[in-house]
Image: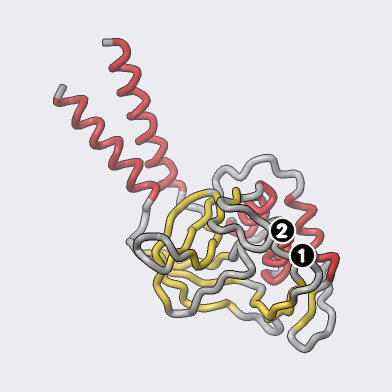
Amino acid sequence: MKTKIILAVVATALIVSSASAGPDLIRFNDIVKPPGANKIVTYSDGVTTEKVFAGELNFTWGTETFNTFCVEIDETIKPGEDYHYDVSQQAVEGGVGGGNPDPLDPATAKIFRQYWFGNGLGWNPIDIQLAIWEIEQEIDLSKGVLNEDSTVYDTTAASAIVAYGSTATSNSGTYILNLWDDDQHTVAKQDVLYIPAPGAMLLGSVGLALVGWLRRRNLSL
């Protein structure tokens, strides 16, 4: 009995540590702004326009600093601010084109994996962000994207990235950090993409395997 209790505690600890592999807060450091990165994006209804940033965002989570992209277009976060978070595979209060919760589209997951693991196809971060918003139904690329000076932005590359993602069938391995303004997780601020380190995923798998073994052992007694 004591052995089973100890194993159960270890398994639970492994799962919890993998699901929350970081401190209680995550910091949004700043936007990563290449020239001309501010876009005026036409929303999917073809009427509402809003000046938004399209490109990479830089975060620090514990000892890890990384660049990523947001899932929503109409939720805002501020540089230098700390946020509470959940780790999931769905957006909260899914923005312009989504529900609540709004599951991560496999196409977005595939595109982000290509970016996260070295961006070997050399995509422009602006086009990656526009492609993600298109897939998540935040914008409609066919209705146009404007540069900050109101000239037309060429969305050919963004559309090609969308096409690249269209063959995906699973969002496995890609996650969303749901950012919250409060520790009760009632005020949603933004959802950003993230891929945990392989060690964290392995830790979680070990924990789940231990739980499964304990359950099977209990059934056989």
- How much space separates mark 1 and mark 2, taking CA atoms? 7 Å
Q: Where in the figure is residue 5, as x and y percent of width and height?
A: 19, 29
Q: Residue at x 68, y 59 (%)?
A: 120
Q: Is residue 148 left or right of residue 152?
A: left
Res 1 → quadrant = top left
Q: Residue 145: give x, y in percent of width and height.
A: 79, 74
Establish if 85 lies above or below 34. above
Mark 1 or mark 2: which comes first in sequence?
1
Reply above or below: 92 against 73: above
| Circle on res. 44 | 1
Does the rendering let one see residue 181? yes
Could you tell me which secondary element the residue under label 2 belongs to? loop
Report the residue marked by disc 2: 137
Residue sitting at x 67%, y 69%: 125
Q: Secondary structure at mark 1?
A: loop
Marks 1 and 2 close (CB-CB < 8 Å): yes
Q: Residue 182: which quarter of the image?
A: bottom left
| Amino acid type at image mark 1 | Ser
Q: Residue at x 30, y 38 (%)?
A: 12
At 85% from the left edge and 65% from the top edge, which residue is drawn?
142
Q: Position of residue 221 (x, y in %)?
A: 26, 10
